[in-house]
Image (tube, rainbow, N blue to C red):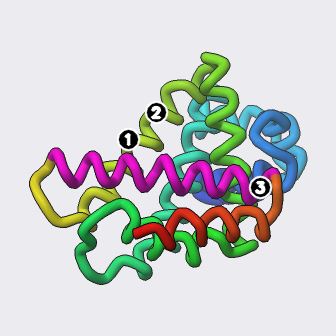
Amino acid sequence: MVKKHSREEILSVALEAALEDGLSRLTFGRLASRLKISDRMVVYYFPTKDELVTSVLSVVGDRLQHVLAAAFSVPMNDHRSLVATAWPVVAQPECDPLFGLYFEAIGQATAGIEPYKSVASHLVEGWIEWLGGFVVGDQDNRRREAAAAVAVLDGLLLMRLLGGSDLADTASTSLLDHR
């Protein structure tokens, strides 16, 4: 008898597979094999690979926001404060796989590949909007400061993934000490 899986269970295993092997290797067949079900069952819940990838990246974004939410307890004045508060949280080794998927999607987006192009722009916009809620000032200032924080954090995180934590920590110290 074949075990039936819910959409949430399939999505959870898809995230696990993507974290282990990357988004580019996430296929209906590999996912079905992990779950020991027919790939038609995966397609039932996720009719296209684009929908599956979009759903996985949405979970990644939700998890990262959950991790960061505890760090932001008071409104901040500028992007430097946002980065100073966020960096110790996002620079933890357990966040690296999530950011690895995020940057894999960003890389595909820069090549104009869908669904990554659409998803990545929504992810970045979502981060700006979400972080803007932790900045004081009018809406334009909140958006501007949040966008600057996302740019700095993305740069530091990419440096961390490619050059190592020591290099990224040194860069963050240099950036944040110049207040």
N-terminal of the pair, mark 1 or mark 3, is 1
Of residues 129 and 34, the one drawn nearer to the viewer in this rendering: 129
Dot 3 or dot 2: first in sequence order is: 2
Amino acid type, residue under disc 1 in the picture: Glu
Say which of 151 and 18 sits in front. 151
Q: Is residue 130 above or below residue 27?
A: below
Task: Tell me which secondary structure the magenta stretch mostly adopts.
Answer: helix
**Where in the figure is residue 91, as x and y percent of width and height?**
65, 70
Question: Foreground: 151 or 41?
Answer: 151
- Amino acid type, callout 3: Leu
In the image, residue 147 lies in the stretch drawn in magenta: yes
- Quick one: 1 or 93, which is closer to the camera? 93
In reply to whether residue 141 is colored magenta, the answer given is yes
Observer-side mark, 1 or 3, equals 3
Check disc 3 and report the residue beneath it.
161
Residue at the spot x=51%, y=53% of the render? 152
In the picture shown, does residue 153 fall above or below 65? above
Write the start and end of the magenta stretch as one range: 140-162
In-image side of 155 versus 137 (left or right): right
Note whether residue 2 is visible: no
Q: Which mark is residue 125?
A: 1
Mark identifier at residue 121:
2
The residue type indicated by label 2 comes to Ser
- The residue under the point 87% across, 40% down is 30
